[in-house]
Image (cartoon, rainbow, N blue to C red):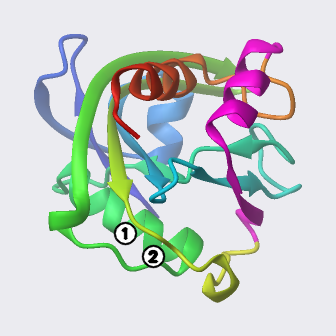
Amino acid sequence: MEYFDVLNEHGEFTGRVETREVCHEQGLWHRAIYGFIFNKNGDVLLQKRSANKKLWPNLWDITAGGHVLAGEFGYQALIREMREELGLDISKTEIMYLVGSTSTNIQKNIINNHFNECYIVNKDVDISKIKLQEDEVSDIRWFTRQEIIDRINNNYDGITDKTGPWNFLKRYYEKSLL
């Protein structure tokens, strides 16, 4: 069972800890992270969500992401999620914090009210050595800058409609020297 720190609408810790289920049923604010891995060519590594995911099944998504567990820092959650979802070890020194945001997503009986942290990792990864967590991830691949921007601009063609992460990715590409 996963437990999350409950936040108020300003992102402040309330001292309350609840299960994932309670947070999602009641729409309680909690923390989430996501990260993008870029190789030296500026390509971004994305994962395809498995068919059995409750939200956005069979769509391409961020490199890795998930909830921040109670008592955990965001960078620790990213390290944990990269290891769990992709079998990939990253270190704190490889992680760059990019931006924070809020998001609300309601699908089916899940109310996700998130304070998000977005991270960037510059790392050349041999994807043939990745070990996928198959109940969450069905595939991974490198996307060129143009491929992913075209998908975003084409009404999120084949990718999740999580507007926040994709807008930050586009902004990063526009402002970075990749």
Residue 38: x %, y % from top left: 47, 53
Q: In this rendering, is residue 101 above or below 32?
A: above
Residue 115: x %, y % from top left: 32, 26
Amino acid type indicated by mark 2: Arg
The answer to whether residue 159 is left or right of residue 81 is right
The answer to whether residue 40 is left or right of residue 72 is right
Q: Residue furthest bottom?
A: 129
Identity of the residue drawn at 27% across and 25% down: 100
Q: Residues within 10 Å of mark 2 (few under 14, many from 20)?
A: some
Residue 10: x %, y % from top left: 18, 12
Residue that numbered label 1 is attached to:
80
Q: In this rendering, is residue 58 above or below 158?
A: below
Within the image, what quadrant is residue 107 found in? top right
Find out whether the residues at labels 1 and 2 contact each other: C-beta distance under 8 Å: yes
- Specify the segment rendered in magenta: 135-155
Amino acid type indicated by mark 1: Arg
Within the image, what quadrant is residue 90 found in? bottom left
